[in-house]
Image (spheres, grey):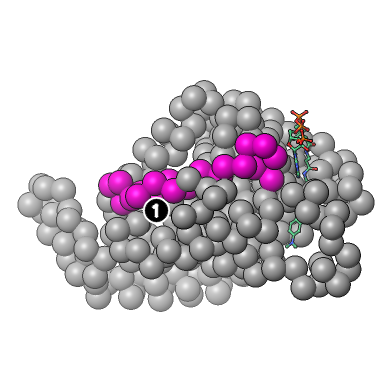
C-alpha cells in the first residue's frame, strides 16, 4: 500500500491517483515519486485501467521537489539520484493521463502536471517554475515541455523570474485546456477520462503517440508516423466494431483488439 498516495480501484476504466503529503503541500520526495512510478506501472499493466487521473489537494497539486530532501544531497547524491529513474518511469506511461490541478503546481509539481496529456485546472491553480529562486533550474522536463506548451516568451519569463501564472493565464497560453471551479476540477477530469475510457484502446494509444510525436518531430516524419498508425488500426477488430456499431445505430463495444 502506498503511503503518499491514495489510489482508487478503476471505475468505468478510470483510475484516480491522489497525491497525499499534506504536511509538505505534496512536495515530491523520493518515496512519493517511487510510489507514483509504481502505481503508473501497475496501471499500465492493468487491462481494466484505460485512463489515469492524477490530482493533489485543494491547496496544492504539488509544491515541487521536496526542498528538505534536496538540502541533504551533494553532487554525488545528485548524480546517483533515484528520482531520475522514477521520473523516467512516469514519462514512459503510455495510457492517457489527465491531471486535475488545484492550488500550487510549482517546480516539479508543474513538471508533473505537464506530464499529463490533458490538464484541467481549478480557478485557484497557480503554475510556476520557481527553481531559479533556489539557484537551480527545472530538471524534470520543465524547460522543454513548458516552452512547447506556452511558447518561448512566457516560458522564459516563468523560468527566469520564477514567477507563477494563474489558471486563466495558463489556459490562454495553452498549458491547460479547461478551467473549472476548484470543487469540480476532479469531477470534470473524471468525466473526460470516462469518455476516453469508452473509446477503442488501441486507437487511443496510437492517437496519443502521434500527437506527442507532433511536439518533437518535423512535419514529414510526423505525417509518416500518422499514416503508419492509421494503417495499423485498419486491421483491428475494434475498427470493424466501430463501423458496424455506427451502421447498426448502437454504441460500440470496444475490446482493445
Ligand atoms: N519541499 C518541502 N516542503 C515544502 C515544499 C517543498 N517544495 N513546499 C512547501 N513545503 C512545506 C513547508 O515547508 C511547510 O512545512 P513546515 O515548514 O510548516 O513544516 C508546509 O509545506 C506548508 O508550506 P508553507 O507554510 O510555505 O505554505 P504557504 O501557503 O505559506 O506557501 C508555497 C506555499 C507553495 C508558496 C511555499 O510553500 C513555497 O514557496 N514552496 C516551495 C516551492 C518551490 O520552490 N518549489 C520548487 C522546488 S525545486 C529533479 C527533477 C525535478 C526537480 C528536482 C530534481 N531530478 C530529475 C533529479 C525539481 C525541483 C523543484 O521542484
Report the magenta residues as a range.
7-27
**Dot 1 beta carbon under 8 Å from ligand 1:** no
> Can you see residue 196?
no
Magenta residue check for 219: no
Task: Note whether 74 is above or below 156 in the view shown.
Answer: below
Classify residue 235 by image quadrant: bottom left
Give the camera-side residue of 67 and 178: 67
Residue at 21% across, 59% down? 254
Ligand 1's quadrant is top right
Q: Where is residue 63 drawn, in percent x and y?
A: 71, 41
Q: Where is residue 132 drawn, in percent x and y?
A: 88, 48
Residue pointed to by mark 1: 51
Residue at 51% across, 54% down? 2
Classify residue 82 by image quadrant: bottom right
Q: Where is residue 86 drawn, in percent x and y?
A: 62, 65
Q: Where is residue 87 drawn, in percent x and y?
A: 64, 63
Residue at 51% across, 43% down? 18
* Image side of residue 12 versus residue 75, left or right: left
* Image side of residue 120 versus residue 140, left or right: left
Task: Note whether 192 is above or below 238 in the view shown.
Answer: above
* Image side of residue 69 versus residue 254, left or right: right
Crowding around mark 1 (Cα neighbors within 10 Å: few <14, some 14 to 19, many 20+) is many
Amino acid at each position: 500500500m502506498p503511503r503518499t498516495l491514495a489510489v482508487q480501484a478503476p471505475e468505468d476504466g478510470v483510475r484516480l491517483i491522489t497525491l497525499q503529503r499534506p504536511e509538505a503541500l505534496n512536495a515530491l520526495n523520493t518515496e512519493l515519486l517511487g510510489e507514483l512510478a509504481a502505481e503508473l506501472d501497475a496501471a499500465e499493466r492493468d487491462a481494466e485501467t484505460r485512463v489515469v487521473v492524477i490530482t493533489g489537494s485543494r491547496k496544492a497539486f504539488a509544491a515541487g521537489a521536496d526542498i528538505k530532501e534536496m538540502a541533504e544531497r551533494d553532487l554525488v547524491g545528485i548524480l546517483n539520484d533515484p528520482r531520475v529513474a522514477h521520473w523516467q518511469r512516469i514519462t514512459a506511461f503510455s495510457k492517457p493521463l489527465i491531471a486535475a490541478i488545484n492550488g500550487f503546481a510549482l517546480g516539479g509539481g508543474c513538471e508533473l502536471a505537464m506530464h499529463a496529456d490533458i490538464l484541467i485546472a481549478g480557478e485557484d491553480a497557480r503554475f510556476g517554475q520557481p527553481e531559479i529562486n533556489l539557484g537551480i533550474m527545472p530538471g524534470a522536463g520543465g524547460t522543454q515541455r513548458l516552452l512547447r506548451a506556452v511558447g518561448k516568451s512566457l516560458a522564459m519569463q516563468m523560468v527566469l523570474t520564477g514567477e507563477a501564472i494563474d489558471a486563466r493565464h495558463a489556459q490562454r497560453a495553452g498549458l491547460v485546456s479547461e478551467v473549472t471551479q476548484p470543487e469540480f476540477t476532479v469531477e470534470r477530469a473524471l468525466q473526460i477520462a470516462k469518455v476516453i475510457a469508452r473509446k477503442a484502446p488501441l486507437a487511443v494509444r496510437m492517437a496519443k503517440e502521434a500527437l506527442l510525436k507532433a511536439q518533437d518531430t518535423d512535419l514529414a516524419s510526423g505525417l509518416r508516423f500518422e499514416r503508419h498508425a492509421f494503417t495499423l488500426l485498419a486491421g483491428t477488430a475494434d475498427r470493424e466494431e466501430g463501423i458496424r456499431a455506427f451502421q447498426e445505430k448502437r454504441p460500440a463495444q470496444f475490446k482493445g483488439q
